[in-house]
C-alpha cells in the first residue's frame, strides 16, 4: 500500500463530502484506521480495502492511478481519476504491473485491461497464513468473481461452505455472497482473478458532484451494511 493510493482514497472521500468519522462508521472501523490508510501509514486488509473503494465508488484503475498525462490547461483542473488519454497499449509488461501490497501478506497486481473494460483483472498472491480479512469477517462486493489458482493452496469460505483450491482449480460466484480467502498452506498461493461487473456497478452509482450525500449516522455500521446498501442501488 503506497502513500499515493492512500492519497487517492482521501481525495475520493473529500470529493464526496464525507468525513473520516462517517466513513469509519460505515465500514465498522476506527477513524484512526481510515486516517492511517489515507496517509500510507498502515495497510488495509482485502476486505477493508474493498469496503472503502466500494463505499467511495472508486475503480481499480482510479485507485492505482492508471491515467494518461495531458497538458495542463490554465484555469482547468484536470481529472484526478480515470484514463483520459489515448487507448491503453495492448501489451503490459510484468514490470509495469501496478501493485497493491496489503495487510498480512496479500498482494494484488493489476493486469492489462482495456480502458473502460468490463473486468478488474488481477494477479493475486497470498503468503502462508495470509487471509482476506484479519478479523475473519466474510466480505461482499458487487460483481461476479472468477479465478484460476496457479500455485499453492487456498481455502475459500463461501456462505456456509468451505472449499480447498489447488493448482488448476477454478472458481466463480456472485461476489455479493459472503466469502473469505485464507492460505493455510506453507507456500505462496497465487492465481489470476477477474471481477466482472464491478466497474459497471460503480458507473451506475450517483455522481458525487455538488457534494455527495453523506450517510446518516448510525445507519451503516459495517462493511457488509455498506455493500448491502449499494446492492439496493441496482
Image (tube, rainbow, N blue to C red):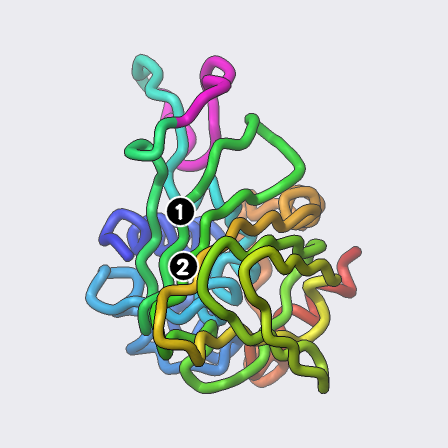
Of residues 39 and 217, the one drawn nearer to the viewer in this rendering: 39
Q: Indicate the position of residue 125 as horizontal and vertical percent values.
A: 40, 59
Of residues 108 and 47, the one drawn nearer to the viewer in this rendering: 108
Judged left or right of residue 67, residue 153 is: right
Cβ atoms at labels 1 and 2 below 8 Å apart? yes
Where is mark 2, residue-wise? Answer: 125
Q: Quadrant of the C terminus?
A: bottom right
Residue 102 lies, with reference to residue 111, above or below; the image says: below
Judge whether residue 118 can be spotted in this image.
Answer: yes
Q: Indicate the position of residue 226 as horizontal and vertical percent values.
A: 61, 71
Q: Quadrant of the N terminus?
A: bottom left
Residue 113 lies, with reference to residue 139, above or below; the image says: above
Judged left or right of residue 106, residue 52 is: right
Q: Which residues are magenta?
A: 76-92
At x 49%, y 85%, the residue is 136
Q: Disc 1 or 2, which lies upstream in sequence?
A: 1
At x 63%, y 70%, the residue is 140
**Magenta: main secondary structure:** loop
Where is mark 1, residue-wise? Answer: 109
Amino acid at each position: 500500500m503506497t502513500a499515493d493510493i492512500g492519497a487517492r482514497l482521501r481525495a475520493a472521500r473529500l470529493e464526496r463530502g464525507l468525513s473520516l468519522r462517517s466513513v469509519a462508521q460505515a465500514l465498522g472501523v476506527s477513524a484512526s484506521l481510515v486516517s492511517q490508510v489515507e496517509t500510507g501509514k498502515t495497510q488495509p486488509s482485502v476486505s477493508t480495502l474493498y469496503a472503502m473503494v466500494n463505499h467511495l465508488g472508486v475503480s481499480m484503475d482510479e485507485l492505482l492511478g492508471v491515467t494518461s498525462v495531458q497538458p495542463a490547461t490554465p484555469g482547468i483542473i484536470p481529472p484526478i481519476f480515470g484514463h483520459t488519454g489515448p487507448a491503453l497499449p495492448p501489451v503490459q509488461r510484468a514490470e509495469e504491473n501496478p501493485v497493491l501490497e496489503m495487510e498480512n501478506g496479500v498482494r494484488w497486481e493489476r493486469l492489462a485491461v482495456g480502458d473502460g473494460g468490463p473486468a478488474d483483472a488481477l494477479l493475486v498472491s497470498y503468503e502462508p497464513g495470509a487471509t482476506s480479512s484479519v478479523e475473519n469477517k466474510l466480505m461482499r462486493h458487487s460483481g461476479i468473481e472468477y479465478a484460476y489458482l496457479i500455485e499453492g493452496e487456498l481455502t475459500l469460505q463461501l456462505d456456509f461452505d468451505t472449499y480447498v483450491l489447488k493448482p488448476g482449480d477454478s472458481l466463480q460466484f456472485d461476489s455479493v455472497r459472503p466469502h473469505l480467502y485464507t492460505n493455510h498452506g506453507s507456500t505462496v498461493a497465487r492465481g489470476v482473478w477477474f471481477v466482472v461487473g464491478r466497474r459497471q456497478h460503480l458507473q451506475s452509482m450517483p455522481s458525487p458532484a455538488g457534494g455527495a450525500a453523506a450517510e446518516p449516522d448510525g445507519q451503516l455500521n459495517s462493511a457488509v451494511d455498506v455493500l448491502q446498501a449499494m446492492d439496493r442501488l441496482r
